[in-house]
Amino acid sequence: MSMAEGPGAWALVLHGGAKEIAPEKEQANRDGCLDALAAGVAVLRSGGSAMDAVEAAIRVLEDDPTFNAGRGSVRNADGEVEMDAAVMDGATLDVGGVAAIRQVRHPVTVARLMLRDTPTLLVADGARRFAQAHGAEFCEAANLEVPSEDAAHDTVGCIALDMRGNLAAGTSTGGLEGCLPGRVGDSPLPGCGLYADNAAGAVAFSGDGESISRSMLAARVMQSLETVPPQDAADAAIARLSRVGGEAGGIVLDHIGRVGWAHNSAHFAVGIATSRDGRPRAYLRKREETAHD
Ligand code: ASP
């Protein structure tokens, strides 16, 4: 298990989705994770906040058409891109989320802008109007990449621990390809697709949003972290999915920077960097980690 224990320790874990990755896409997934790790780690190394690191890493993933978020977002049944994103601050338990938002370049940044506001979640036109009022960057629908045909289940997420001991979590997604317009999955829902609490840890999920929500996977992980290490918490959450079925992957950090991750999808693109390990790593399957470490 990677860890970052000790004073001034930091850790950042991100994912590019629980999905099946075609062999010709493997390198793009690894490279995309490493690029996003670099952006997040630069923030943490210079003493920046976990929230800034999460936002910086997710913005890189949103700009990379390899991933189903921002530019690479999949289209719904009407051929439209509607995106969901959320961030959570583990120090204050503040949450900011947007759902079914259109044409913003960085949904995670709009979610971040909502962080200190109420409500915690704005959808569709309400989210778009909030983004406009707060000067968020917009782009034409035509500038969003048309996803490749095998795009599926590849939401992005990031969790981080900063040198001051603060945790943050974030998610961003184009949802599920061909879904009903207005459909919202787990990604912007605290306790389902993400959660962060300095007292326990941080978590982010990807996969079948309805199954993740119905199983409250993020909440399950947070509860498990009271008694077991992050890897066990991640494994237990994925095991819970068997009750309703579905595929998912989850990344977990505890409050001292220990890392866990698990998936029941064929692949799960994950990037990990901690102050203790130094070297950022990207994996596409859990078994690669044990083979390499
Ligand atoms: N969990 C996301 C959703 O259901 C999809 C994904 O992870 O790719 O919207």
Image (tube, rainbow, N blue to C red):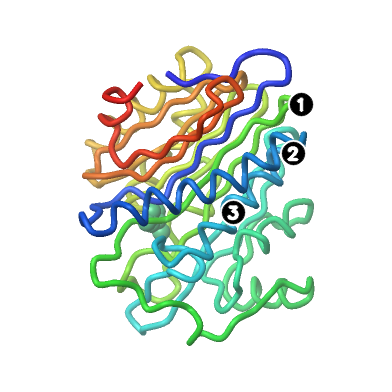
Residue 260 higher or lower than 229, as above or below? below
Residue at mark 3: 86
Label 3: few (<14), some or many (≥20) within 10 Å?
many
Residue at mark 1: 164
* Horizontal side of residue 23 vs 33, given as left or right: left
Residue at mark 2: 49
Labelled pair 2, 1 in contact (Cβ < 8 Å): yes
Q: Quadrant of residue 244?
A: top left
Label 2: few (<14), some or many (≥20) within 10 Å?
many
| Mark 3 element type | strand
The location of residue 33, given as percent across then percent down, is 45, 48
Dot 2 or dot 1: first in sequence order is: 2
The location of residue 54, given as percent across then percent down, is 62, 46
The location of residue 240, given as percent across then percent down, is 30, 32
Q: At 71% from the left edge and 46% from the top edge, which residue is drawn? A: 52
Q: Nearer the viewer, mark 1 or mark 3?
A: 1
Label 1: few (<14), some or many (≥20) within 10 Å?
some
Which amino acid does the dot numbered 2 rest on? Ser
